[in-house]
Image: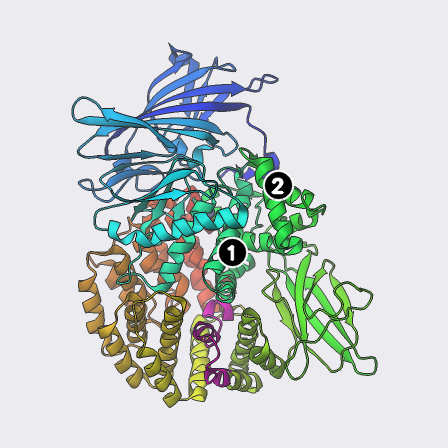
Amino acid sequence: PTLIRLSDYQAPAWRVSRVELTFDLGIDATEVTSRLQLACDPTGPAPLRLDGEGLTLLDIQLDGQPLPESAWRYQDNVLEVDGARDGSVLETRVRVTPAANTALEGLYLSGSRETGFLLTQCEAEGFRHITFFLDRPDVLASYTVTLRADRERFPVLLAGGNPDGHGELDDGRHWARFVDPHPKPSYLFALVAGRLQKIERDYVTGSGRPLQLVIWAEADAIRHCGYAMDALERAMRWDEQAYGREYDLDVFHVVATHDFNMGAMENKGLNIFNAKYLLADPDSSTDEEYRAVEAVVAHEYFHNWSGNRVTCRDWFQLSLKEGLTVFREQQFSADMNSPALKRIEDVALLRRAQFPEDAGPLAHPVRPAQYSEINNFYTATVYEKGSELVRMVAGRLGRDGFRRGMDQYFSRHDGQAATLEDFLGALGDANGIDLGAYLAWYAQAGTPRLTARGRYDAAHRTYTLTLSQHTAPTPGQPHKRALPIPVKLALFDPRGRMVPLHLAGNGADAGASERVLVVDKAEQSFVFEQVEAAPVPSLLRGFSAPVILECDYAPADLALLLRHDPDGFNRWEAGQQLAARAYDNLREGNSSAALDAWCEALSALFGDTSVDAALLADLLTPPGEIELSERERQVNPSHVHALRQQLQEHLALRIGRETLEQRYTALAAHTSLELDAASQARRRLKRRVLELLARIDPWAAHGLATLQYDNAPNMTDRLGALAVLVRGDAPQAHAALAHFRERYADNPLAMDKWFSVQALLPGAVVLERVRQLESDPAFTLKNPNRVNSLFGAWARSNPDGFHRPDGSGYQLLAERLRQLDALNPQVSARLATAFNGWQRLEPTRHAAARSAIAALAAHPGLSRNLTEIVQSMLQ
Ligand code: B3K
Ligand code: ZN
């Protein structure tokens, strides 16, 4: 397969200044008429080549004249046209078949032929499945779009931009037109047509411009859109205040669909959402899902500036919009909820999803140097690590400096397709700082390991901290360089108080209790003076850089930080490190110092009612199995699972059965439907306490879980209880599952949870359950959410259940990937990344995984998407 390389980038020889599109919409056949106003670089006229995939060309004219067949060629997904000049107008008419489009890219049908609706997904390269175009993000055009369709079947017609008239046609058809005055790349084009209901809200921007917000969904879902509308309004207000950015059209449409390849899409003026990230109601959504809806609604809205007004020059710059927008979304969520909890959640996600990616065969830089299929690069590295890079730069500039820089970036590049150099350039220029050194972070894959060693000199009252960095090789990058790593730190005295910092040879900030050191060499030492006693360093506070910290703390040091660090994030972090050491104790069996310290510190915190309930729930959760696997040289996922269970057992025993039960009962007495932070926190802690109780007294825990399930006023409590019953293999699980199945039969998002909760069954039994669930009439490979709820949950979030020693899990996944690939390559390729980490498995599983992946790779006719993933996997 051909590789596209960043180093080969060339500005387009042809541009399109205006696009006029007319759609004659039908489920089986849609005709698209396009009129492109072309511009060309007069210095070197190149042949006009347009992208187009799977299009049936019906008509082609250049400057008003039909083109003879000799003047154009359509092959290998390229339409080449002779005779075009600067200012030429090219008109084409093509036919596409939405109902046959199972890849959900381009124009497709959501739902059934009878009641479903038509919609588009163009990012990254879907527009070429709709019409011929220069389908690349650096070609920006203004769009006029006319939709025509049967009025009864497609009563609602939407496209991006401002409405510009509508009316009746003959034969019961009607039309509607939309004009988008803001030039945009083709990936931001969208249309929607069908039977949809709406909710509306008037909004007045900070500068006093009135506009309308409209959310659309199918009839049964529209009543679940109110929360998203509130979230949208909060996000718009926040972007005005935090970044001075206002919305720029008269109307903002948002549409929910159950058939979507990813979370949502920021099409200009017409965001389209996976229903999972738009619909929310207490009866079918958990607290986590409410927060996810708020975050994704905000994320897509924020793209209107970071992505749409300033877009990407090429797809290598993807993190320019994604990393930045994730960062903005994280800031927003932190402001709306708790900053410490948000940081914990984000760092936990980074470690669970991005660190393993960076450590395995799919590792790639935040700005990749090459790709075969761009859709494979919408990864945790581009998104989450990309956000961490923005966070480091923002930290370097400070609050006001970052805002100044962002203002500069938006004003300098408004209406342009920009690069990461442009971004760092604008931020740096606005502050008189050269941020060029951070580009290295964008180009280098792999997670740096930062090693810290401290030495206290009692005679001189000095503390010397030596920090060294090392990044292991990744595919294609054998040699790594040192990166600028900002290390925010504090020192604690033996009684748990922060001490004033006096850095030798550096008068600035003397006496402050926290400061940032930048490590940009392989090794550097820092000397602190006037230190009265051997201190405990609190390093990388707030997770100031996306690195793995290795510090030879004694368990007591971590316990001290866990008890005393005033920063919620670092407190949790100390607990995580201590839990990881406790895990090592259990595995090695040679010491129990860390295990004792962890259990001791947490049981003390458990009794401390001043600790926030949600933070306590997080403190009581050790690192997950995927994270703990990183500590093993050869991974046996069943072993990791068992050790982590033991770890929780020790903790539960230490806290005590009665204490757990009492706390549970107290928390359960407060059951409410409210979504405020305190109610959510209580539910989170209640679930965690129940899970811990289940480790040491399953009988009692299952009794409580059954009561909780039966009386749950919301999905958080109901699903939490169900999970305890199912994973604990409780006798009550069967009835609860049957009840859930029946109660939510008509609610796809709730049914997804029914599949997931069972896909997370530990051990060998899950395989048979997965097979059984596949033959449930509600299962289908055609719906991405359903596929992810069963196969995604099983293969990605249930290591013990997926990595069976006999290889049966690998074979089942490989088989399904093949079938899925024929329907939807984006979804199959993403699911295939569940094999990541196979190279570090113990020998039996290693061999079984290799042969399953190799057999899959050898299968003829795999999509480019899946091919790229499995090939990299085998390198
Ligand atoms: N930009 C879209 C993702 C598109 C994925 C294409 N395979 C959603 C987002 O990040 O906001
Ligand atoms: Zn995004």
In the image: residue 755, left or right of residue 388: left
Q: Secondary structure at mark 1?
A: helix
Number of disc labels: 2
Magenta stretch: helix, strand or loop mostly: helix
Q: Is residue 299 visible?
A: no
Name the N-terminal-most of marks 1 and 2: 1
Q: Residue furthest top?
A: 65
Using the numbered discs, state the Cα–Cα distance from disc 1 to disc 2 in whole angstroms: 19 Å
Specify the segment rendered in magenta: 602-629
Task: Tell me the colour scheme of the image.
Answer: rainbow
Q: Secondary structure at mark 2?
A: helix
Residue displayed at 19% across by 56% down:
746
Estimate the x, y position of residue 526 in percent, counting from the top left.
77, 68
* Residue at numbered disc 1: 331
Estimate the x, y position of residue 624 in percent, counting from the top left.
46, 70
Specify whether tag 2 is near ligand 2 (CB below 8 Å).
no
Instruction: Please determine whether, in this image, residue 102 is positioned above or below residue 65.
Output: below
In the image shown, does 199 or 38 lie closer to the viewer? Answer: 199
In the image shown, does 635 or 376 lie closer to the viewer? Answer: 376
| Residue 50 location, quadrant | top left
Estimate the x, y position of residue 206 in percent, counting from the top left.
47, 44
In the image: residue 384, left or right of residue 557: left
Residue 617 covered by magenta stretch: yes
Instruction: Please determine whether, in this image, residue 75 is positioned above or below residue 527.
Output: above
Amino acid at the residue labelled 1: Gln
**Residue 408: mark in rendering:** 2
Specify whether tag 1 is near ligand 2 (CB below 8 Å).
no
Amino acid at the residue labelled 2: Gln
Estimate the x, y position of residue 255 in percent, counting from the top left.
32, 44
Residue displayed at 19% across by 59% down:
745
Label 2 Cα neighbours within 10 Å, binned few <14 / some 14-19 / many ≥20:
many
